[in-house]
Amino acid sequence: MFHTVARYAHRIGLALLVGAVLHGSASAQVPARDTLRVRGDTLRLPADSAGADSARARLRADSVKAARLARRAADSIKTPLATAELPADSDIGQRYRWARDELFSSGALTLGELLGRTPGVTGFASGWVPSPHTNTYQGDFRRIRVFYDGIEFDPLDARMGPMHDFSAIPLWTLEELVVERAAEELRVHIRSWRVNKTTPYSRVDVSTGDLSTNSYRGFFGQRFSNGAALQIAAQQYSTQDERTGGNGDHLSLLGRLGWAKKNWSTDVTLLRTGGTRGEQFRIDSLALANLPGFEGARTDAYARVGYGNVDSPYWLQLIASTSRFAETNEKTATTTTPTTPETPFVGDTVDTTSSRAQYIATGGTKLFGASLSATARLRVFDGWWFLTPSGRLGYDRGIMSLAVYAEQQVSDSTFRGDVSLRLRPLRFLAIGGSVGRTRPIDGNDRPQSLAYRGEVGLRIGRLWATGGIMSLDTTLVPAPFVYDTLYQPVEVGERRITFATLHGPIWKGFGVNVVANKAPAGEAYVPEYHVRSELYFSTSWLRKFPSGNFHIQASAAHEYRTEVLFPVADGPPQSSDQYRVISTLVELRLYDAVLSWQYRNVMGEIYTVVPGYSAPRAINYYGVRWDFFN
């Protein structure tokens, strides 16, 4: 009898549990407006029907409003604003790609420093951060192109010629950066910072260090319930070096208004970078001139309308942009004086202003695992217009990754095309390469060029080791006359560079990043040996801090470079120094704050990267980056 009673009690308990669950589910499924219904004995409505209807209408309106506010509060992540397309990944092991947090934790202060960690790239700077930063790819200054949100950044500064000053491209505004290693050129694809949450976001970065270096940076961004977006950001930094000069004071601004909902997106963006740099003194000889000061600004503005996302089955974007560079240096009496070893190097000290517009129509689709896209880029400047059509094919699935690019640029009468391929037949083996061709059109006297890159990679645990060779055909290398108008362009034949890399974790949080290049001896604007080695430790220590609110990163980097020749008119070439530099970086994240400290040139090496201009000696640079929400 006891067992019978227990059995009935068990069944009754199950029945009560099921009833409670069903009752809770039924309550949860009742519409929100029904939850505001009240019993007649608790709320007496007016006797007349009009009053009763009015009260019920007010109750329903309040219920609908409450439901709408609840939906808005729950929908805190909005459709992202449109962004630029990225090429397919054809690299072996680790792609040369940096997300926003990785950009700031890399220790690089300029885009030129960051690109110097790519095989085949050599960076030059006459001094600390404000000085002009130039980079070569396989020894050629014009082989690096920059695309900011799909808009090509054309060199507008007359002092720079056909190359970029990478210190003037604001690294702090980026959300993501991808380096496309084509055989014939390096294409840098940049996506600018975006916000997609309705929770207000703000951030403050403050840094200081030696050479009176001070940097202040602030961000604010928010998405609104109707899909609108507001972003404002600014950076100001200043330096002062009494020993070599080149003092700088720069201010950069970023502003964006946008809207995105479902498949549609539109935004208007303004980017302005400008400031001053004082005269920089040479250290080698009083007979040669100093680097003159500079004052000016570059402004880029664009409006974009987009349908679909670049990762969706099909997408389309229309962009209208304008870029303006204005140099406001005061004219000097020696402006027209020719530069010789006996007379000062004066550079471009006249007031100059240049501007151009770009109108872009671009779109793409995905078919059978492949992505196809086409772009029509219309440039307008100096009363002329030039149309540049281009197309891209990408495929990345299974053991194969393929990237094809073709472009016919009317502005410099050149056709470019390249194919990059990566095969990974085994988990520990990958083979890749790229072939590119450049040929003149419409009577251009530029020589036809063929370039290639071959690479083999082996995986050892989580570590990738690669090695290969890259080559450029006959080409004319422009001179970096921003440093001295005595420097001369050079025509070079086939130039082969061998390279090796080592990337990835070794054990637990320890890892390495190594890039080594070997070029022919005696070549202009490229060192024979250039090696950058970095040993790092990175961990969030999740066993001790399972919440993920702690992270530590520490690294030590060693850079070795042999001398570089800079040909001059009517005389032997000048050369930079051979040097070895050790630098360290430590970053500690606690919740939403990151403490950063880097110590550059720990041993106080005295050397030059550009002949005649002393590179910075030992420099401490430290600060904090702090994110705030709501």
Image (tube, helix red, strand yellow):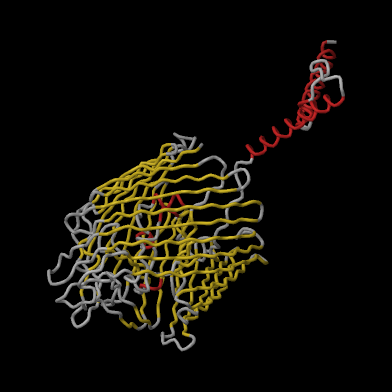
Q: In which quarter of the image is residue 372?
A: bottom right
The residue located at (44%, 86%) in the rendering is 444
Q: In which quarter of the image is residue 343?
A: bottom left
Of residues 347 and 211, the one nearer the viewer is 347
Q: Residue furthest left?
A: 286
Q: Quadrant of residue 179?
A: bottom left
Q: In this view, does 435 lie above or below 510?
A: below
Of residues 279 and 614, the one nearer the viewer is 279
Q: Position of residue 166 (x, y in %)?
A: 36, 63
Count of numbered tags: 0
Q: Which residue lies furthest to the top in this view?
A: 1
Q: Which residue lies furthest to the bottom in this view?
A: 443
Of residues 425 and 264, the one nearer the viewer is 264
Regarding residue 528, the answer to whether it shows in the image is: no
Of residues 95 and 514, the one nearer the viewer is 95
Q: Is residue 152 above or below residue 342?
A: above
Q: Is residue 253 above or below residue 225?
A: below
Is residue 150 found left or right of 108 in the rendered image?
right
Regarding residue 620, the answer to whether it shows in the image is: yes
Is residue 140 found left or right of 604 in the rendered image?
right
Q: Position of residue 478 (x, y in %)?
A: 33, 77
The residue located at (57%, 54%) in the rendering is 81
Is residue 258 found left or right of 528 in the rendered image?
right
Quadrant for the N terminus in the image: top right
Q: Position of residue 173 (x, y in %)?
A: 44, 54
Q: Where is residue 441 in the image (x, y as percent from the top left)?
A: 49, 85
Is residue 171 found left or right of 52 in the rendered image?
left
